[in-house]
Image (cartoon, coloured by chain):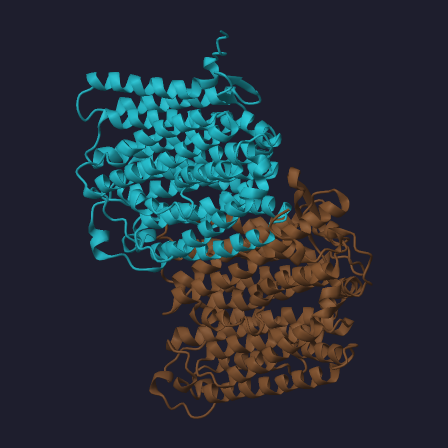
Chain colours: A brown, B cyan
């Protein structure tokens, strides 16, 4: 079947909305029908997104599966979708994790089922839109619109402090977003001044040369929005709250996809649009990334709540991703991009397992467990595999990503590269410590607590979910080539863009942003 | 003696609204008490005719009555917006006034007279016409605010609005007198010419006059520091009247602000830009910050309307064609979302203006899911979150400001709108994330299909404009190019 003529990206972006409208029509009492409608929609969506992977042309950094329709012509806004190697894997990760997250909610969500699945499907549309849009206006719309369903998922179906967590999540992200909005407008006018054309098209804006002084400000405006999303130290405080309070599926999506939007934003926008500023910010970002790695790991070490432990481990893992991306070497870039996918799978699986334990025991405190492997042997196996993948054991996906990142960091031209790599490596060791220690305390030892004795092991549905995740862990761990080969051309292209020499500035007349005062 | 050009077509929108009001008063006499539905129908028909008369003036540039009244795209476009506002208000009022026991014919008549004043106000090319229009709509509104005379709050609202409003009118009138004294004319075009030619009498007096006019118009737009009446008056007035003030009056006042400041005083731009920038910043900050602590929904929307005036002032400060285009776009979106939100308040309200505290909407998503969903869309639009009209409107306004280099104003605008997100979200928190109060859940619900229709129109408009703003943006651009 030939997919080139079929608007596949629009298809996978908006199919979830069709599912959501179907659910809107069902009676809210028919929970089974609602669940299956949601799951089948997301499963079909995943299946039709697979051709993106198989038909993806290797060896080119061009956008593929492009669709472009004028939307608001007088402002040069178009409905422009497309994927390259960077966004391809993230789109697939989104469709994959959405289906998994929806399937995992079948038993966990018993209240207001109808609204829940509608929001889940809305969220999927928003996330795919963020990764697939190539027009800044369109991107911003998806970026913000996606906050709404996530806000409801945390705020309605979350834990005891859900309202605090939901509002904090929304406001933090919003704060970053509005700064980005101003920066987008500045870019828009810069392009108009340089070429006389109004456009929000990202591919056209790439060719813009911006004066170094403006680059710094614009990088900061975009960067804060993305750093909050990643989250990088010191913008990370919303994350533990949001993760702990969110329902399991919400945490899976949050960790698996939403955090990636931050790192994706850096690669897609900051590096190619502001190359000089990116280079100038390498020391700052690297140091913040290392602080995130070590701080996240230390915080994980002292957590009593498994979910919070996993949440802080995300801060640590995303620090690795940032370090790799800002090494500006091909290994670092590919490792960072691959690690984004790996983290989505491993941490997603960890949250799923924590959720499954919670459904059985209604607690997440490590002290309440102990010896669970005797009561839940099947779960224990999956938990072990996921834990090892999170640590980065060779043979699992985590190893490939972390290895490439450390290699890339070492090989970067940065004078402190060895120090960065050494400090980051301690993060790997700490990662092993907190994960294995947690596993040991929760799963091994005597099955002392009476509440833990009669627990039922995984159901068929849960095994299917975890098998799918485990399959991905081993596939990427043992044979990462299909993934890396799709990343390669685009990674080289980003590196080429970020290392292009500073050109004669055409835009803004090289004005310092401070001189743009109030009065004309 | 040369007789002035009399062209009734130019004042037809105002005239039709006025005639409808008179007709309502006459028909009211023959209608039995409590059966005033026909009057609502009459008002709606009158407003449709008045709106189409306004749309008939699109694309022209004509003056009449010694250049006192103008027909241009600004008056035509805003004539339509005002009629739309009044149309929605009539729909919101129909069952509300029955519920509150104030179902009198005069209500509709006063609404029509007020609409007449507003349409006249936006087509004024002379300070005298501006003043005339302002008084016509204000006096009708003073009465409407106190229309629910059984209620102490309504009477307080009317008195407060009347006293402070008269004070503001006096400022405006004194400003007009000073401007006339220094420039020798009340005609906006002539004033502009005098200013270009530097032929004013006394610059200080002129500037004082400009300042007084700003006070008068700033009062009607509810800009800080002329906003103190807003929360009390908005809270006490019957809710549809509040909606009309928040939508219609603010809209018209911004047109007047554009005509006077960008038009007549365009050449004094360097002098007034700083003052207006400060007013804009204060309005955005104060409106948004004080809204955060409001526990009454009507007061919350009152402060939100102050904050929105701040964003609009940013576009006035930009003083460009793009700025005017963005103001028109913003006001249309704003009218839809504000009227929709007040419409929801009417629908969840109980007789005696009860049930309007924040706790009262707890768990609304369970008891009335569609109402909660509609309110959510409107609130997200007010907060400026895509894909709604409110987002495109904010985007447009800040684009206009940034294009003219107002970097810090834009920055303050977007940052204060984050504060805005907080209090709009809080209403959603109550509706979706809290359990319903026992007392509220057990109380009988009240419904009005006309108000529901108005809310539906508003929600549909907000979503449609948000998703497909293209053609409307082009129209706003055309509207703006015809100004000046």
Q: Is residue A184 above or below residue B43?
A: below
Mark yes or no: residue A137 visible.
Answer: yes
Q: Position of residue A378 (x, y in %)?
A: 50, 79
Q: Give the residue at x 29% y 46%.
A: B232
Q: Is residue B291 left or right of residue B70?
A: left
A499 up-or-down from B412: above or below:
below
The residue drawn where x is 30% and y is 17% is B23
- Please tell me how many numbered marks the rendered image carries: 0
The x, y position of residue B366, in whole percent, is 32, 53
Q: Residue at x 42, y 78 (%)?
A: A364
Q: Is residue A201 visible?
A: no
Q: Position of residue B96 (x, y in %)?
A: 26, 36
Q: Residue furthest front?
A: B202
Q: Which of the pair A479/B75 is nearer the observer?
A: B75
Relative to A217, residue B68 above or below: above
Which of A81 and B133 lies nearest the eye of the viewer? B133
| Residue B359 falls in image quadrant | bottom left
B468 and A23: which is toward the camera: B468
Residue pictured at 56% horizontal, 36% vertical: B324
């Amino acid at each position: 079947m030939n997919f080139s003529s079929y608007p596949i990206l629009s298809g996978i972006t908006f199919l979830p909305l069709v599912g959501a409208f179907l659910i809107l029509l069902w009676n809210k009492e028919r929970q089974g029908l609602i669940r299956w409608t949601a799951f089948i929609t997301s499963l079909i969506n995943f299946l039709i997104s697979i051709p993106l992977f198989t038909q993806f042309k290797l060896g080119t950094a061009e956008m593929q599966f492009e669709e472009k329709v004028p939307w608001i012509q007088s402002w040069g806004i178009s409905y422009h979708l497309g994927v390259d190697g960077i966004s391809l894997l993230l789109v697939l990760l989104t469709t994959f994790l959405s289906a998994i997250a929806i399937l995992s909610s079948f038993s966990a969500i018993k209240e207001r089922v109808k609204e829940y699945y509608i929001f889940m499907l809305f969220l999927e549309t928003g996330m795919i839109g963020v990764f697939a849009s190539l027009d800044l206006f369109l991107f911003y719309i998806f970026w913000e619109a996606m906050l709404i369903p996530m806000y409801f998922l945390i705020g309605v179906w979350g834990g005891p402090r859900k309202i605090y967590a939901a509002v904090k999540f929304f406001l933090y992200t919003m704060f970053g977003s509005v700064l980005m909005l101003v920066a987008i407008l500045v870019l828009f006018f810069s392009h108009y001044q340089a070429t006389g054309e109004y456009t929000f098209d990202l591919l056209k804006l790439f060719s813009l040369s911006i004066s170094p002084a403006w680059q710094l400000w614009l990088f900061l405006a975009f960067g804060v929005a993305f750093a909050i999303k990643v989250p990088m130290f010191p913008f990370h405080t919303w994350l533990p709250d949001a993760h702990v309070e969110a329902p399991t599926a919400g945490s899976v999506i949050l960790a698996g996809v939403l955090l990636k939007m931050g790192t994706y934003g850096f690669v897609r926008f900051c590096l190619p649009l502001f190359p000089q500023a990116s280079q100038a910010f390498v020391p700052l970002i690297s140091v913040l990334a290392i602080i995130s790695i070590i701080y996240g790991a230390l915080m994980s070490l002292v957590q009593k709540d498994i979910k919070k432990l996993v949440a802080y481990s995300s801060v640590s893992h995303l620090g690795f991703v940032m370090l790799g991306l800002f090494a500006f070497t091909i290994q670092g870039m590919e490792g960072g991009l691959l690690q984004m996918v790996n983290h989505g799978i491993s941490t997603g699986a960890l949250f799923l397992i924590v959720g499954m334990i919670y459904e059985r025991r209604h607690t997440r405190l490590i002290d309440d467990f102990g010896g669970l492997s005797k009561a839940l042997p099947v779960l224990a196996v999956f938990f072990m595999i996921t834990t090892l993948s999170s640590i980065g054991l060779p043979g699992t996906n985590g190893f490939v990503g972390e290895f490439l990142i450390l290699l890339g960091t070492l090989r970067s031209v940065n004078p402190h590269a060895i120090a960065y790599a050494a400090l980051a490596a301690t993060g790997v060791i700490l990662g092993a410590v907190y994960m294995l220690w947690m596993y040991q305390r929760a799963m091994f030892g005597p099955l002392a607590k009476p509440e833990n004795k009669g627990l039922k092991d995984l159901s068929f549905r849960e095994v299917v979910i975890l098998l799918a995740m485990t399959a991905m862990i081993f596939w990427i761990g043992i044979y990462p080539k299909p993934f890396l080969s799709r990343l390669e051309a685009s990674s080289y292209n980003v590196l080429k863009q970020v290392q292009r020499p500073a050109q004669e500035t055409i835009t803004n007349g090289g004005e310092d942003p401070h001189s743009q005062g109030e009065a004309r | 003696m040369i007789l002035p050009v009399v062209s009734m077509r130019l004042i037809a929108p105002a005239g039709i609204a006025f005639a409808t009001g008179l007709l309502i008063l006459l028909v009211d006499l023959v209608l039995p008490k409590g059966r005033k539905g026909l009057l609502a129908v009459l008002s709606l028909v009158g407003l449709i005719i008045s709106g189409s008369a306004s749309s008939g003036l699109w694309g022209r540039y004509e003056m009449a009555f010694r250049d006192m009244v103008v027909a241009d795209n600004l008056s035509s476009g805003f004539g339509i917006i005002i009629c739309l506002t009044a149309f929605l208000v009539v729909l919101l009022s129909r069952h509300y006034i029955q519920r509150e026991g104030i179902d009198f014919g005069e209500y509709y008549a006063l609404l029509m007279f007020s609409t007449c004043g507003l349409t006249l106000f936006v087509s004024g090319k002379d300070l005298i016409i501006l003043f005339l229009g302002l008084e016509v709509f204000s006096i009708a509104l003073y009465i409407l605010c106190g229309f629910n005379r059984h209620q102490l709050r309504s009477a307080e609202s009317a008195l407060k609005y009347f006293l402070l409003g008269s004070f503001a009118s006096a400022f405006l009138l004194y400003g007009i007198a000073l401007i006339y004294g220094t420039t020798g004319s009340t005609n906006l075009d002539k004033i502009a010419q005098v200013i270009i030619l530097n032929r004013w009498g006394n610059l200080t007096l002129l500037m004082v006059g400009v300042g007084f006019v700003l006070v008068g118009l700033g009062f009607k737009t509810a800009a800080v520091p002329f906003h103190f009446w807003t929360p009390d008056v908005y809270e006490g007035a019957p809710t549809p009247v509040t909606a009309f003030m928040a939508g219609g009056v603010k809209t018209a006042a911004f047109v007047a602000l554009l005509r006077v400041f960008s038009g007549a005083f365009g050449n004094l731009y360097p002098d007034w830009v700083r003052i207006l920038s400060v007013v804009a910043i204060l309005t955005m900050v104060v409106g948004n910050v004080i809204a955060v602590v409001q526990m009454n929904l009507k007061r919350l929307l009152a402060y939100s309307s102050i904050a929105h005036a701040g964003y609009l002032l940013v576009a006035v400060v930009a003083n460009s064609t793009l700025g005017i285009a963005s103001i028109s776009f913003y006001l249309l979106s704003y009218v839809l979302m504000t009227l929709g939100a007040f419409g929801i308040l009417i629908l969840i309200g109980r007789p005696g203006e009860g049930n309007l505290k924040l706790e009262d909407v707890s768990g609304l998503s369970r008891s009335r899911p569609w109402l909660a969903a509609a309110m959510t869309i409107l609130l997200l639009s007010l907060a400026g979150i895509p894909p709604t009209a409110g987002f495109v409107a904010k985007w447009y306004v800040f684009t206009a400001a940034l294009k003219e280099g107002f970097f810090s104003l834009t920055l303050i605008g977007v940052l204060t709108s984050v504060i805005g997100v907080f209090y709009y979200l809080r209403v959603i928190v109550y509706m979706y994330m809290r359990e319903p109060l026992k007392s509220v859940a057990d109380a009988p619900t009240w419904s009005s299909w006309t108000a529901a229709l108005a809310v539906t129109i508003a929600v549909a408009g907000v979503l449609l404009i948000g998703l497909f703003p293209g053609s409307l943006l082009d129209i706003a651009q055309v509207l703006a190019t015809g100004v000046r």
